[in-house]
Amino acid sequence: MKMNFVVVSQLLKQTQSILKSGYLVFVLSIITLSLFSKMQIVIPLLLVTGLLAIHHYLFIRIEFDRGLLQHMVDQPEDVESLTQQLDQSLLNLKLIPSSNTGRNWSERFKGCLRLLKIQIVIVLIQYSVFIVLFYKLAHR
């Protein structure tokens, strides 16, 4: 069971590289807008900034989950006891609703990986927006 924590934690660690890629494409989009645009750039600027904000929020969520998983790996206590403590802490801090306590770890792992997949989709959307902006603005 602990190996599942290690594997998912290591997968979630890749979120840092994905975030850096998102910031890179954000900067490229801003440069493209500033160099080639002779039109109003408010809407494209809001779009690339909004995508970056969503991306960064996902990064924070994923890093939080990764830290919790790593803590589970590092502790010598049994997983069930730590899970109850984790749920109680998250509940006390109002970070999860009471309906989400007591979930099994396979559901939690799926949720973590779903967030990572959403982050990957967001960075792909960021690159798509950049390519469209560059093409539209450079070929005017």
Image (spheres, rainbow, N blue to C red):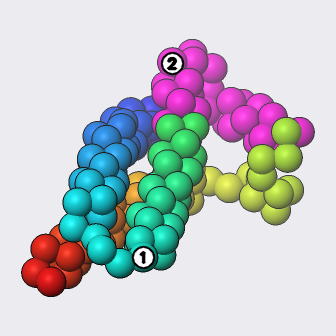
| Disc 2 crowd, CA 10 A, few/some/many (<14, 14-19, 20+) | few
Q: Find disc 1 in the rendering and name its residue.
A: 40
Residue at 13% x, 74% y: name it.
138
Identity of the amino acid at label 1? Gln
On the image, the x and y values in percent for residue 29 come to 29, 60
Q: Nearer the viewer, mark 1 or mark 2?
A: 1
Q: Residue furthest right?
A: 92
Q: CA distance from mark 1 to mark 2?
A: 52 Å
CB contact under 8 Å: marks 1 and 2: no
Q: Is residue 98 left or right of residue 110?
A: right
The answer to whether residue 125 is above or below residue 86 is below
Q: Secondary structure at mark 1?
A: loop
On the image, the x and y values in percent for residue 92 come to 89, 39
Which of the pair 41/99 is nearer the observer?
41
**Extent of the magenta region:** 65-92
Residue 90 counted in the magenta span: yes
The disc at residue 74 is: 2
Q: Look at the image and tell me in which quarter the C terminus lies.
A: bottom left
Identity of the amino acid at label 2? Asp
Residue at 58% x, 33% y: name it.
68
Q: Secondary structure at mark 2?
A: helix
